[in-house]
Every structure is written in C-alpha cells, then in structure tokens.
Amino acid sequence: MSGRQSGRRPTLEEVAALAGVGRGTVSRVINGAPRVSERAKDAVARAVAELGYLPNQAARALAGSRTDAVALVIPETEARVFSEPYFLDLIRGVSAELAAADRQLLLTLVRTEAERQRFEHYLAAQRVDGVLLASVHGDDPLPDRIARLGLPVVMNGRRSEAEPVAYVDSDNIGAGRAAVAHLVGRGRSRIATISGPLDMYVARARLGGYRAGLTEAGIQPDESLVATADFTEEGGRLAMRELLERAPGLDAVFVASDVMAAGARGVLREARRRVPEDVALVGVDDSTVARLMDPPLTSVRQPIEEMGRTMTRLLLQKIAEDSGADAAPEQGVGEPRRVLPTELVVRDSS
C-alpha cells in the first residue's frame, strides 16, 4: 500500500527503496543537484509519483544548511582513549584539520548497543555534517547504519579487505613483514607474535604479515608461537606469560602495538630474559611508549596523526559534494580509500 493510499506521509527512505537508489541520491534529485545520472533521475521520479511523495520544505531547508560540526566516534572506554598514544595522535590530526576548516569536533565514545542507538537518533536529527569512525570491530553495524542515514562517513581502518565504506588505513600487512624480516636479519629464528583481537582487521592484517614474513624467510609458521591479546598493556602481559609457558625457547617477539609490547617487556624482565640479548622485541606505532621503554623499543611507525588529517580531508570533501556543489557517488560505490605506508624504526630492543 502506498503512502498516499494509507493516508501516511511517505518517507525519503521509502522513495529510495522503491527507486533502488540511496537516500542521498533521492535528496540530490529532489534538490536539483548536478551530475546525477538520467537513470537515477527517472527511477526517483517514478517512485515519487507512485508513492505520492511531497518533499517537506522545512526538512529541505534544514538539509540545505550545515551544522559545521563533525563527529569522531570511537567505540572504546574513556580510560583507553585518553591513555593510549594512538588515539591521542589520531584526535590531534583530526582536530587540527577541522580547526583549519573552521569546523567543530564532537568526540563520542560508543560502547554499548543502547549508546549506539542513541547516537543514531542524534545523527538522524541532522546535528552533524559527517562522521569519522575509529577502532571499529568487524561486526560493528554502525558504519553501514550511518551510510544508510545519508551522512558522509570515513573510517580509520577497515572491518575487512572488502570494506564498502570510505576509509584511511596504514599498511598493516607490510608492518608485520618488515618486523619479521628485521628480526630474521638479526639472526632470530624462534619468532613469536602477540596479536590484537582477531575480530579487528588491523590485527588480522598484522598477523598475516607476520606469517608472510616467516614464510619468505624460509621459516615454517608455528601456531604455538602466536598469542592473542586486546591492544592493552595488561593484555600484552598475559599473552607474554602464555608464550613463555608454551615456547620457553623463543628468541624474539613481534608485538602488534607498542602498548602491548610494554606489558610484554615487564613479563620478560620478571622472567629474567634480557632484551635484546635473550629476546628481541618489536612493536607497532612508534609512539612515546616505544621511545621511553628500557631499552627503547624498535617499532613499525604508522603515520597516525597524518591518518587523522587524511580521513578528515576526505570527509570534508564528501560533505562538500553532498551539499550539491558536486554530487557525490553512492556510499560504497567509488568510495575513497587510502592506505598510508609504514616504516620500521630500529632501536635497542632488537
């Protein structure tokens, strides 16, 4: 039954569903934005006629305005966000780029389904112009829900190799390969790894790089040398204890973050294993944690602040396109994707 037949006002989403296009395309057709395909225009026109859709002038006026605010959403606890150098560097990059564009930053921590639903309602009220997402796990539905609302969205990292939403990432596979190649070059052969949570693509990619690096060096990967943690210092401690129990003869560890490497270093000291004489250690991020460790930690540098700047520039570009000045493509079709290079920084721990 159409909205006209039921006496209920049809929604923009219903028009989009019937036309087989995205909500943003319907909005651009109705507002006369340029560079929308004739096929999309015809499909929207037919759906509008069939449903009896009448654009809400007040809503159109609101959609044409801007809040000059962008949300940065991180699904982590306050303790982790404000204590880990990764998030602080990312926020610094985002904040600097938004300040240069005279935009406001709304930092939002979403940890539960109830908080996720409240945030979606907030977005539906058009209180921000776009959304940046960081630290997203593989099963998180929020990126797709935001895209369905018609809001521009860019992620820091990705949920899978086939991520449909725009993202900025670093070369995490290359990070694992470079770390292992360095350790092999130092004469190490029993190389273990402490991975991040495997429901995150970043952790799977670094683990994949570790395994690829071993294979390239002619070393058969050994699953007893793999421990999974959660990107926290305590997680690194627990994983290091597990590895020492399983493989006491290990002579090197590639740790998927500097923070976890700090936890692993503490356990090695307790076990009277010298770094790097007995066990070489390599982390990822090249954060202040790496530089302040004893000995200073060899780490794979990823350009965290630049990732924040790049994802913000991409989002601002998408916001400008969605304003009608330059019609944007559908979410998931031709979405911008950037993978920034990583670099091994060698210090005394290896």
Image (cartoon, rainbow, N blue to C red):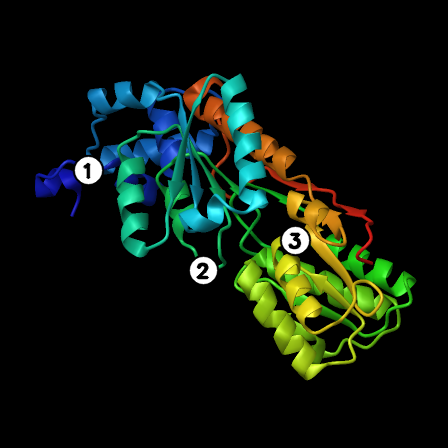
Q: Name the kind of residue labelled 1 in the image.
A: Pro
The answer to whether residue 305 is above or below residue 219 is: above
As rendered, which of 180 and 78 lies closer to the eye? 78
The answer to whether residue 56 is above or below residue 173 is: above
Q: Residues within 10 Å of mark 1 (few under 14, many from 20)?
A: some
- Horizontal relation, residue 24 to residue 283: left or right: left
Q: CA distance from mark 2 to mark 3?
A: 25 Å
User: Residue 326: in sight, yes or no?
Assistant: no
| Residue on which disc 1 sits | 10
Which label sits in the foreground, 2 or 3? 3
User: Residue 300: in sight, yes or no?
Assistant: yes
As rendered, which of 48 and 28 lies closer to the eye? 28
Label 2 vs 1, first from the N-terminus: 1
- Residue 117 - label: none
What residue is at 38 percent from the left and 40 percent from the top? Answer: 108
Q: Residues within 10 Å of mark 3 (few under 14, many from 20)?
A: many
Contact between marks 2 and 3 (CB within 8 A): the answer is no
| Residue on which disc 2 sits | 139
Label 3 vs 1, first from the N-terminus: 1
Q: Name the kind of residue labelled 3 in the image.
A: Asp
- Residue 258 - label: 3
